[in-house]
Amino acid sequence: MHWRASDAPWVLADVGDNPGGGGGGNTVDLLKALLAAQAQGVLLAVFTDPALAQEAHALGGGAAFEAHFNRTEQLPFAQTFKHAAKVQALSDGHFVGRRGLLHGSPSSMGLSALLEMGGVRVVVISLRQQLVDPAQLDALGIDLASVRTLVAKSRGHYRAALEGFTLTERMIDVDCPGLTTPNLKSLPWTRMPRPVHPMDEDTQWSWSATVDV
C-alpha cells in the first residue's frame, strides 16, 4: 500500500519487553501511557496473560468487566494493572503463519481474547510469544485497516510480518522498562564492576599486546 507520510499509521515497538529475547510480553507501561492520553485507534499485540485470557473466555463475548492484568504473574517489570474492558472477540489461538518467520507453519497462542478499553484494544494470549505474523491478528478478526497505532511486543520480526502496513520511518522503537531493553543504563545492575561501557560515559579502556616471533 502506498501512503502519504502524514496519513500512514504508526508502529510503536515495545522492544524492552520482547518475548523473543526473554521478555515476559506483559509490561503495562506503554499501555497505561496510551490510556492516560486517551489515545484512539490503538491496538496492542500481543500481551501474554493466561489468567486474563481464561477469564475473558469464561465471561464470553460482549462481556464488560474490570480487566486485571498480571494478577498472577511475578516476572520482573510485570506490574499489576486494572482497567474497565469489554470482550470484543475470542479465539482458541490457532493460526497458520502468512509471512516472515512462521510463513506456512501452524502455530498457537493458546486461549486468546481481544479486549476493548476505550480507544485502545489489547490482544491477550496464553502462550508467550512476540508479534511475528498478521495471522495472529486474523485469529481474532482484526482488520489492520482500522488500526492507527499498533503497539508491537517485538524487537524486529514484526517488520516482516507487517510489511505494507506503514512506512519504515513510522516504525518507532520505544524506550520502556523491560528485560530486553537496549538501553542498558536503565537496568538495575548490582554485581557489575564499575565503571564499564556503555553504562558509564567516562569509561576509559587501555590495552597492550605482545607478539612472540
Image (cartoon, rainbow, N blue to C red):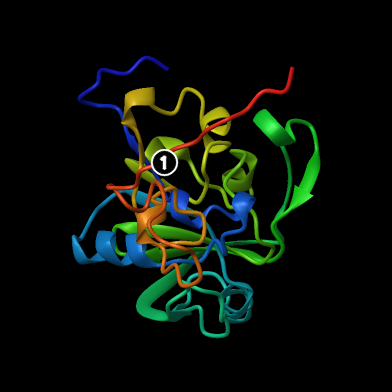
The reply to whether residue 9 is visible in this rendering is: yes
Residue 77 percent coordinates (x, y): 45, 71
Q: Quadrant of residue 80?
A: bottom left
Q: Quadrant of residue 132?
A: top right
Secondary structure of the residue carrying tag 1 is loop
Q: Is 212 situated above or below 174?
A: above
The reply to whether residue 167 is visible in this rendering is: no
Residue 48 percent coordinates (x, y): 58, 65
Identify the residue at horizontal 64%, vertical 41% (top origin). 135
Identify the residue at horizontal 63%, vertical 81% (top origin). 58
Give the tally of numbered discs.
1
Identify the residue at horizontal 34%, vertical 51% (top origin). 175
Q: Is 123 situated above or below 66?
A: above
Query: Label 1 neighbourhood size at 10 Å, few (<14), some (14-19), many (20+)?
Result: few
Residue 151 percent coordinates (x, y): 41, 49
Residue 128 percent coordinates (x, y): 65, 61
10 to the left or right of 154: left
Q: Nearer the viewer, residue 63 or 180?
A: 180
The N terminus: image quadrant: top left
Q: Nearer the viewer, residue 170 or 76?
A: 76
Extreme residue toward the front, this view: 213
17 to the left or right of 166: right
63 to the left or right of 174: right
The C terminus: image quadrant: top right
Residue pointed to by mark 1: 205
Q: Amino acid at mark 1?
A: Trp
